[in-house]
Image: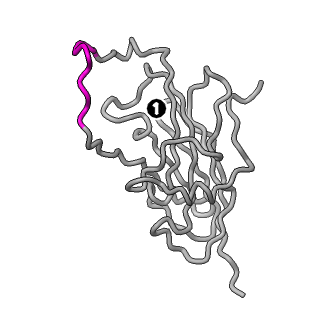
Amino acid sequence: MQQPYKIPNDCNFTQVIESGFGRNGSGINQSNSCSPEIMDLNFNGIVINAPNEIIFDTDSTENNQNAIPLCGTYAHDMGVYIDTKKNFINSIIFVVVDTKTNETWSGQIPELQNLARKPKSISGDRKKLTLEEMKGRIIGGYFNPNIFNITSARLYETEYIVYATVGPYKSNAITIKATKRKQK
């Protein structure tokens, strides 16, 4: 059976870092060269991509120094919506596990305040769909946060396992090796 998605292995994560992670570390919600691509239109779930290794000089993660971008794509049935008080993307829980110590960190993309007023509908009679009416309607999107901006993970020499989960959906897991550059 063919994978319902494709993860680009030859992408440049430096470009993702250079394009920034949005306000408050929330990530840019657009596709990029490192975003997984959903091949099967019936796919429901989350797929992530991250660098297999990062090499760092200092353990600082402030101001996106030594960032680990997590590029993701999701598609889900709106009838299986998880938290009606949040957007789907803000309901995703990102998990980082240190494989040596089993220390675990988790976090979510913070919800941004929409400062613009919601426009009124033209007819004024637009009703909100129920979960039952939303079943079978697939919606999708992208996310690109810095792992250190959304979790309290610490940077040191180790291997991390990273995945994302929300409701019935769990992403693929990625192993990221963190290596401190040897001083000459």
Say what amino acid the circle numbered 1 marks.
Gly
Residue 65 x, y percent position in the rendering = 52, 69
Q: Which residue is mark 1?
A: 167
Where, quadrant-wise, is the N terminus in this rendering? top right
- Secondary structure of the residue carrying tag 1 is loop
Q: Residue at x 45, y 69 (%)?
A: 62
Q: Is residue 123 magenta?
A: yes
> In the image as oriented, which residue stretches furthest toward the right?
1
Q: Residue at x 49, y 68 (%)?
A: 61
> In the image as oriented, which residue stretches furthest toward the bottom?
184
> Main SS of the magenta segment?
loop
Residue 177: name its quadrant. Answer: bottom right
| Residue nearest the observer in this picture, 102 or 158 | 158
Point out the stretch of residues depicted in magenta.
117-127
Where, quadrant-wise, is the C terminus in this rendering? bottom right
| Residue nearest the observer in this picture, 101 or 118 | 118
Q: Is residue 33 magenta?
A: no
